[in-house]
Image (cartoon, rainbow, N blue to C red):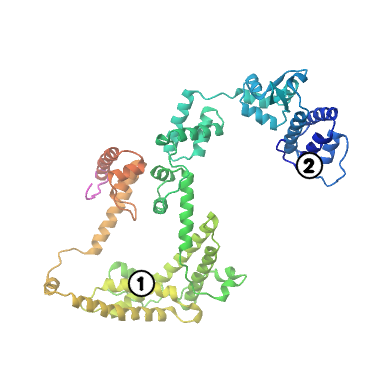
Amino acid sequence: MGHYNTDTISELANQQMRFAPQAVRHRQIAGAEALLDQVDGAKAYNFADICKRLTGYRPERTDTGQIAGTDLIHDLRCFIEDLSESLKLESNDFSEPLLTVREVSEKLNVSAKTVDRWRNRGLASRRVLVGGRRRVVIPQSTLDRFVETHRDEVDRSQNFRQLSDEERERIIFLARQLASEGLGLTDVSRRVAQRFDRATETIRYTLRDFDSKNPQNAIFPTNGTRLSTSHENLAYDLYSAGIPLTDLARRFGRPKSMIQAVIADVRARRIKSLDIDFIDSEEFRLPDADRIIRTTAPEYDEPDSTARVPTDLPAYLAELYNVPLLNKAQEQHYFRLMNYLKFKASNLQQDLDLKQPKGRPVAEIEAILKEVAEVKSLLIRSNLRLVVSIAKRHLKPGANFFELVSDGNMSLIRAIEKFDYFRGNKFSTYASWAIMKNFARSVPAESTRLDRFRTGFDELFHESDDARGNPFAAEMVNTAQRTAIQEIMKELSGREQKVIACRFGLDYGTEPETLEQVGNRLGVTKERVRQIEVRTLEKLRRIARRRRVDIPGI
């Protein structure tokens, strides 16, 4: 028996083959074929009505349910084939020509698969004996009716043409070009299909078939395989640094869609691995906690006109005295806000599913943590002068003042993380105690370490003149030069800017790259990178001379 989609039609066919006389089965085949031409695949039909139409009687059961039109079309075709097979008919028993599936495909210039699809869409077929073998055949009149009622579908199938060798080569060539730009199989198939006026699935099958037969020269040699963990992290870091997805897809030999999925996975994993520590409070769980806590901060106190900036501080430390001090109400507000934001981020982090990471929760956590960083930065800036004040009191001969300040800053940051605002204490009291406790350990330990490794040349070294210039002045000059370089680079093209930035490490947090590394990033040879670099440096010299900018090395 055929494979039915519904049990009710299957049971009906079995009953008719076992108990209905041959003459009745002949009439039922004709009735089923007539019904098949009237079924609409978009509608649903009651089995009782179908049974009445085929057999002349209604079933005793009333809960037979509805049958979808597409399922009914398929099952009626199986019903006709099974009943015709049960009659043990031969081709000579028909008064009209019978066509096999192959003969129909040759007559209409379509594939045998297309004819099989038509059978599932309403082309009624029989199972009869042809030359001693049981074959699936289609009567000529049945085929004519199907062609007449499905003219558009038949015309589309007849207009389909097989790929020629020349056309297949052109498709492979264009697909390889698009794949080199970082496009995946789906995007490449769609674009090539539009270019050659072909079905997307036809192009997809052609490309997959080529890759399977030519693994050494495949268009997508690593399609579907994952990157290693180290490469996934590298791809995320490069994307975070501003490298386009197209460059990353070319560099790692993966489609852009896969690189996007990798970046989303790494992004979620890193968010999930963060240790979000906070000072908990019952008020965070109130229904209107967001409205109560995320309010406008209290106003600053009146500026203290008696505050005096020490004269022996460098300029960037003196700037700290321009940041106003927080009063107690402001401290309570900002510490409560910071810990509440961490509380929200922690709850979202716990609900994050790494198996199916969603972009919205990850983006929400990142936005909250960014707001936490802003509040924390404000608290640090507002208390940095406290670190300077305590460091000056612990300064001893031979000690480095800036190392003390740096060490004290770390103590300040830890104090901000651990401060329990709910107890009502002022933060400066807690932070002063934490910084002095740290200095009480680190300053004697550093002195002991220096004494242990002191040599006879140290005194001579301290007495010798330092020929180096002022480091703060050098830093200002370096900043000015970098600003000038960034300004004149605006006159370069995009590729020239990328080559110079990569070769000399001009972007923040990057190191200079070799010619080969830049070539791999841009998809060109290292000799081409060298040519672009020489030409661009000469262009920068001309721009610098025109602007009268003195930049060493250019």
Q: Are marks 2 and 1 in contact (CB under 8 Å)?
A: no
Is 254 contained in the magenta span?
no
Task: Identify the residue under disc 1.
Answer: 410
Residue 327 at what x, y percent from top left? 45, 77
Residue 176 at what x, y percent from top left? 43, 34
Residue bounds of the magenta highlight: 545-554
* Residue at 42% from the left image edge and 67% from the top image edge: 377
Q: Is mark 2 on a helix, strand or loop?
A: helix
**Which disc is residue 68 wearing?**
none
Q: What residue type is labelled 2?
A: Thr
Instruction: Give the camera-side residue of 235 and 317.
Output: 235
On the question of residue 328 being in view, the answer is yes
* Residue at 81% from the left image edge and 38% from the top image edge: 15
Question: From the viewer's perspective, is 53 left or right of 156?
Answer: right
Closer to the eye: label 2 or 1: 2
Is 550 contained in the magenta span?
yes
Q: What residue type is labelled 1?
A: Met
Question: From the viewer's perspective, is 89 left or right of 431?
Answer: right
Task: Identify the residue under disc 2.
Answer: 8
